Amino acid sequence: MGGEKICYCFNYTEKDIRNDFYEHGRSTIMDRIINEKKDGNCSCESTNPKGR
């Protein structure tokens, strides 16, 4: 349970987000994704089957 991939660029799964939430009281993963995107380290167009 929880193995559905949420972020194809950085390989985050539903389980990763859940565990991050339990560990920090909120998910910090979105902050990491935003910072990586700002640094140009996102390839959603090629890694995500939906292209986003």
Image (cartoon, rainbow, N blue to C red):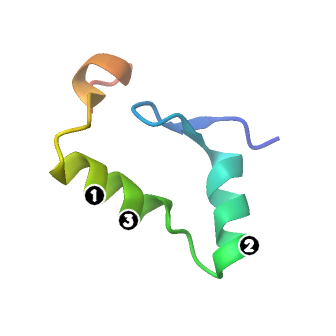
**Label 2 vs 3, first from the N-terminus:** 2
Binning the other alpha carbons within 10 Å of mark 3 as few (below 14), some (14 to 19) or many (20 upward) gives: few
- Residue at coordinates 18% horizontally, 48% vertically from top-left? 39
Marks 1/3: CA–CA distance: 6 Å
Mark 2 vs 1: CB contact within 8 A: no
Q: Position of residue 17 (x, y in %)?
A: 62, 57
According to the picture, the residue beneath numbered tag 3 turns out to be: 31
- Is the Cβ of the residue at disc 1 closer than 8 Å to that at disc 3? yes
Residue 22's image quarter?
bottom right
Q: Amino acid at mark 1?
A: Asn
The local secondary structure at tag 3 comes to helix
Q: How many other residues sit within 10 Å of disc 1, few (<14), some (14-19) or many (≥20)?
A: few
Residue 22 image label: 2
User: Is 22 positioned to the left or the right of 34 in the image?
Assistant: right
The amino acid on which the numbered mark 3 sits, given as a three-letter code, is: Asp
Badge 1 element: helix
The crowd level at tag 2 (other Cα within 10 Å; few <14, some 14-19, many 20+) is: few
- Image side of residue 26 versus residue 2, left or right: left
- Which residue is label 1 attached to? 35
